[in-house]
Amino acid sequence: MKGNHIVWDKVKAGQALFLSWKSLRLRIFLIIIVTGVIPCILIKDGILNNYEERAVSLRTSDVQTQVKIIADHLLNYNYLQETSSEVINAEIDQLSNLYDGRVLIINSNFKVVKDTYDISVGKTMISEEVMKCFKGQNTANYDEKNGYIEITTPIMQQGVDKNKDGQTEESVIRGVMLTSVSTDSIAATMEILGRKGNVLEILIGMVIFGVAVVLSNILVRPFDRLTDAINEIQEGYTGELISVPDYVETVHIVDAFNQVLARMKRLDDSRQEFVANVSHELKTPITSVKVLADSLRDQGEVPVELYKEFMEDIAEEIDRENKIINDLLALVKMDKTASDLNISVVDINELTEIILKRLRPIARKRDIEVVFESIRQVTAEIDEVKMTLIITNLVENAIKYNREQGSVKVVLDADHQFFILQVSDTGIGIPEEAMEHIYERFYRVDKSHSREIGGTGLGLAITRSAVLMHRGSIKLTSVEGEGTTFVVRIPLNYIAS
Ligand code: ADP
């Protein structure tokens, strides 16, 4: 039942999509229909027009030939003066019957001497065509609307006048034959042809419709498959890549999509790894606290000093847990967008001095000297809290990973665009292979050493995020056993995106 519903929903969605003008399927369908049907209509009309033209011109020349013969006969029988000649009358009647037409014969006085309809005999006929004809022009006009062809033919007497050399000089037009012939038979043939054409057109139209439906579905199917594949992934991502190799276009879409998938997978993996790391890091101090508390409880009578010592250890582990949680919170804040920065104009020299003052007592415990060299006075548009984190983390690390009686040097310089903060130490250095991992969350070169000195492995991750939020850069150079230098460059003016 549910399956039926889904199928029905899909059909309805398909119909809605098909009806939308934006549907590729509809567009392919329409293109096939238009490119198929329009030529069909044009060809039919072209054939019919061509036929009509040819038929009219054939009929005109047929009639003209016959009229010409009659016109020549007329003169022999002196018909323009006397219209009683039976031979000519029979010829004229035959012509008008044959073409279902009317013949008028006009003499040189523009008088109608013969009309096969017997209506205009004796009347004067001065039409444009007749005048033209008297000047020697044959005319033939097709009146499509009323369905006839009107033809004028001059009645010519050849070589009547002779010049002084006895040669025929010119022909004289003695009258005009005005013939109208019906084109009904042509129209009837056209109608039959037109009807046949229509039937053919409908048949071809039906075939084109079928082809359009099938083709538009077949051509769009790869895109449907693509949508299905993407939907399947949406329902439950298995890590499998999709493939729809039908078109270059689908291959491009699939490639782009697979890249997004791979990125998602990387993000997913790193999120899982992060959660695993966080749990592990948070569990470590708690496990220590539990072990300490259990041993105190199980020992029965314990001297007060031991109690105190254990309690101090427990307090230390709680501090550590606190530090990890604080660092995690700082990191989460960094993951937000740059718009979360709280920008103000800050005196960087002063800020550095304050931080160093706070850190010097820690350095002094291990006899480490902290020097500040300010090359120029710097004020910049920065987020003070995040900048404090950057400087604190770098200087803290320079102290933590230093040797006894070592030194830390902080140099502040600026050019016209950036200020540059350089933190160098004379410490243990960072091995070459560790350099690319140093900014990863929870990464520590020497886990137990870092733990001993209270590291969480989050400091440099926080520092790098804060630098990037300011659209700055961080670089490091280090020689193992000699020392490390971190160089941070931050724009003097905050660049809003
Ligand atoms: P931690 O809290 O462990 O110091 P960080 O992210 O600040 O974490 O640093 C990551 C690791 O990089 C440290 O554990 C340490 O091994 C190494 N490191 C960082 N700064 C220095 C430095 N100045 N000298 C040597 N090693 C360093």
Image (cartoon, rainbow, N blue to C red):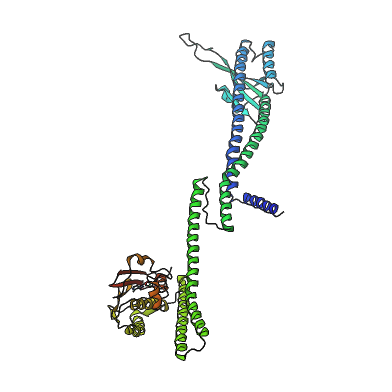
Residue at point 49%, 13% (across, down): 169
Residue 425 at x, y = what percent?
Answer: 30, 76
Q: Position of residue 352 (x, y in %)?
A: 34, 80
Residue lying furthest bottom? 304
Q: Nearer the viewer, residue 159 or 201?
A: 201
With 77 as the anchor, is 442 left or right in this view?
left
Q: Nearer the viewer, residue 284 or 380?
A: 284
Q: Is residue 190 positioned above or below 442 on the image?
A: above
**Residue 395, quarter of picture:** bottom left
* Quarter of the C terminus within the rendering: bottom left
- Across and down, in percent, residue 434 comes to 36, 66
Where does the image place residue 130, in percent across and percent down from the top left?
A: 60, 24
Nearest the viewer among 193 and 71 is 193
Residue 328 seen in render: yes
Q: Give the image quarter of residue 58.
A: top right
Is 77 left or right of 326, judged from the image as shown? Answer: right
Q: How many marks?
A: 0
Find ligand 1 in the image and state its quadrant.
Answer: bottom left
Res. 176 in view: no
Instruction: Name the residue: 63% across, 34% down.
Output: 204
226 or 285: which is nearer to us? 285
